[in-house]
Each structure stands twice: as structure tokens, then as C-alpha cells.
Image (cartoon, rainbow, N blue to C red):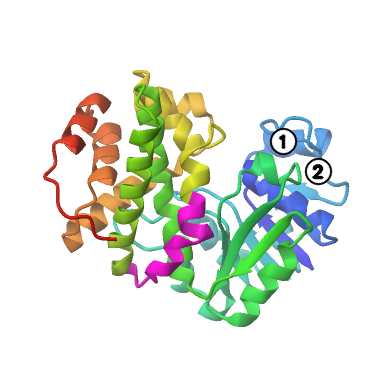
């Protein structure tokens, strides 16, 4: 297939390379002409070491060129950029084609998941996603990985599975598109909390509590988006939560650890050097919780640390002094 791939972060470069290795004609788009120049010349991403792109992977900073005669569009842009980029796509593409999301987040103010944003202007049957526990650094090294694909239509879901499957990249279909996207978005917030916890010198007990109560928080809030709670027990929920909360490869985890060291949010962002989606999504989670009167204490704590100057140690104290209720799962 002829694929327009939008977004040249590590995840975009990784998946575009995977698709090209699968025999597809892939053009990777990025706004930055400087980055495109580096990718064209070096065939390597600045943040992915010595891994080289396939010779048949093309690069461009011209969106119209990327979209020309494409059979499918796949995106790996930031949460902030998803609506703007899709608006540009609508103006430029020759005909509607399947639009596959690999970014993870919830739009601020609207509380919309990314498929809902795209569905405002595109037939739902053309929308799908890929999500799950997957570091770009491991996928591009062909380490065994299992993720989930989902879509509004069965045909698009099967197309995604066929496009991306390799001997080391295993894809499970799941028809709960909202649940798959919600779990992938929310886990980034809990990963920041785990990074803060480790950075403050707390142990595995603390992190286990954060992950477990974090998953409970995700489940509680998921009902407002019509998700199936069982989806959150799978790869796009608990699986993605584990890989993001337990690994230093996670930019959200690293961001949290930098905050614990005493860095300001701005300096922590700069030190990570890539998008920290949990810092964006914690605002959306806080807003959703407030509107629907659902307690999201971990998300609220991360929101307050990043945007209200709450000291991380005080945030921990606030969480530990909350009233204890019977555990419900």
C-alpha cells in the first residue's frame, strides 16, 4: 500500500520503518525541514542510535507530497497537534482514506478521545488505532512486542493488523476503540507519578500501589467515555501501564523523576527533549473528573504539581492522608 505517515518522533520513525520493511511504499512527513534533511542524509533518527531506516522509506516536509495518491494515512503527532494536523490533511488529500491513530491522549476542554476528534469530519468506518505496550527503541530492535489494533469497522481493524504484523510485532484485534484509546492515554499520567515516586526514593511497594490505584482511577473515569472495563485489563490498559510505569525508556516516567529532583516542569520538559503526553492529558483527566464528579486523586496530584506549583512531597502527603474506603475493583 501507499502510506502517508505523519509525525517523525521516535515512534513515527519506528513504525514507518516497520511498514517500509513490510514492503509498503511509505512517505514520512514532519514539519521540521532540518529534521527531514537529517533523516534523508543519515537514514537514522537522532534519538534512536544506529538503527537505520529502510532504503525505500521516503521523507518530506511537504504534507501534500506525503498525501499524494496515498491509500492510508497513519499519524504519530502530539496531542496538541492532532486536530491541527488533521485539518490540514482534510484540505489537501485527494479523497478520504483510512486514518489510523497511534498517538495517545485526550483533548483538553472537550474531553474527546482522538477517534472522536477525527469522526467530527471523517466517516467513522475509516478510523482506527494502534496502541499497547511498546517502546520504539525495542520495536525497532525487533524485540518481541504485542499490541492492540481497533477501529469502528471490522475491515479497517483487520487492515491495521495486516499492515503492521511482523514475526516480532504481534497485533491483537479489539473492537472496543474507546477503551483501547482511553487506556493508552491515561497510563501516561500514572507513569509520571511513578517517576516522581522513584525519584523521591520510595520503593517498589509505593509504585505497586500507584499502578494499582491508578488503574482503578482509569477504570472509574473510563465509564464516561463508554469504554468496556475489561479492555483495561488487557494490553492497551494494564499492559501499557506496566511498560510505561516500570521503564526508564518512558519519557513520562523520566519527566516525573526530573520533577522529583527539583526541576521545574519547563526544565523537566527540556531535559526529556520529546513530547510528554501525560503532562497534557492530566489536564483533560482533571477536567473530566471535575465535570462528572469522579475522584481522580493521582491525576489531580500530577496536574497540581505541573500547573499549580504543588511540591511533589506535599502531593504524596496529600495522597497518603486521604480517607481509606473499602477496595472495589
Which residues are the magenta region?
225-240
Give the class, few, some or many, for how many residues have Cα within 10 Å of label 1's Cα (few <14, many ≥20): many
Residue at (19%, 58%) from the top-left corner?
Answer: 294
Task: Give the spatial CA distance, label 2 vs label 1.
Answer: 8 Å
Q: Which of the two residues, 101 or 196, is positioned nearer the viewer here?
A: 196
Helix, strand or loop at disc 1? loop
Compared to 116, does 105 lie above or below? above
Residue at (29%, 61%) from the top-left corner?
Answer: 329
Helix, strand or loop at disc 2? loop
The answer to whether 87 appears left or right of 47 in the picture is left
Measured as percent of width and height from the top left, residue 309 is found at 23, 28
Q: Which of the two residues, 2 or 62, is positioned nearer the viewer here?
A: 2
The disc at residue 220 is none
Q: Which residue is mark 1?
A: 45
The disc at residue 53 is 2
Compared to 172, does 55 lie above or below? above
Task: Please identify the quarter of the rendering in which residue 88 is found.
Answer: bottom right
* Outermost residue to the left: 323
Compared to 104, does 195 lie above or below? above
**Most frequent secondary structure within the magenta stretch:** helix
Residue at (50%, 39%) from the top-left corner?
Answer: 275
Measured as percent of width and height from the top left, residue 307 is found at 27, 35
Looking at the image, is mark 2 or mark 1 earlier in the sequence? 1
Measured as percent of width and height from the top left, residue 280 is found at 38, 45
Q: Are marks 2 and 1 in contact (CB under 8 Å)?
A: yes
Q: Quadrant of the N terminus?
A: bottom right
Is 261 in the magenta? no
Measured as percent of width and height from the top left, residue 237 is found at 46, 57
| Residue 96 seen by the camera | no
Amino acid at each position: 500500500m501507499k502510506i502517508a505517515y505523519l509525525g517523525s518522533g521516535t515512534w513515527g520513525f519506528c513504525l514507518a520503518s516497520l511498514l517500509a520493511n513490510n514492503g509498503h511504499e511509505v512517505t514520512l512527513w514532519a514539519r521540521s525541514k532540518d529534521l527531514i534533511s537529517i533523516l534523508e542524509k543519515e537514514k537514522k533518527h537522532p534519538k534512536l542510535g544506529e538503527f537505520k531506516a529502510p532504503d525505500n522509506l521516503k521523507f518530506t516536509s511537504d504534507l501534500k507530497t506525503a498525501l499524494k495518491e496515498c491509500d492510508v494515512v497513519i499519524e504519530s503527532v502530539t496531542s496538541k497537534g492532532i486536530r491541527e494536523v488533521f485539518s490540514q490533511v482534510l484540505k489537501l488529500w485527494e479523497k478520504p482514506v483510512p486514518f489510523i491513530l497511534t498517538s495517545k491522549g485526550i483533548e483538553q476542554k472537550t474531553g474527546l478521545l482522538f477517534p472522536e476528534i477525527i469522526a467530527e469530519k471523517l466517516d467513522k468506518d475509516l478510523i482506527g488505532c494502534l496502541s499497547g505496550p511498546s517502546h520504539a527503541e525495542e520495536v525497532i530492535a525487533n524485540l518481541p512486542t504485542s499490541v492492540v489494533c481497533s477501529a469502528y469497522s471490522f475491515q479497517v481493524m483487520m487492515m491495521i493488523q495486516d499492515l503492521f504484523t511482523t514475526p516480532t510485532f504481534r497485533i491483537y484485534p479489539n473492537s472496543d476503540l474507546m477503551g483501547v484509546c482511553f487506556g493508552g492515554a491515561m497510563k501516561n499520567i500514572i507513569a509520571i507519578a511513578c517517576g516522581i515516586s522513584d525519584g523521591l526514593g520510595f520503593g517498589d511497594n509505593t509504585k505497586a500501589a500507584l499502578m494499582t490505584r491508578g488503574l482503578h482511577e482509569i477504570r472509574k473515569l473510563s465509564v464516561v467515555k463508554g469504554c468496556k472495563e475489561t479492555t483495561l485489563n488487557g494490553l492497551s490498559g494494564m499492559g501499557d501501564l506496566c511498560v510505561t510505569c516500570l521503564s526508564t525508556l518512558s519519557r513520562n516516567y523520566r519527566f516525573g523523576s526530573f520533577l522529583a529532583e527539583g526541576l521545574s516542569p519547563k526544565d523537566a520538559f527540556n531535559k526529556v527533549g520529546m513530547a510528554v503526553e501525560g503532562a497534557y492529558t492530566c489536564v483533560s483527566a482533571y477536567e473530566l473528573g471535575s465535570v462528572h464528579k469522579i475522584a481522580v486523586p493521582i491525576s489531580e496530584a500530577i496536574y497540581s504539581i505541573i500547573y499549580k506549583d504543588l511540591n511533589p512531597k506535599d502531593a504524596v502527603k496529600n495522597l497518603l492522608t486521604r480517607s481509606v474506603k473499602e477496595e472495589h475493583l
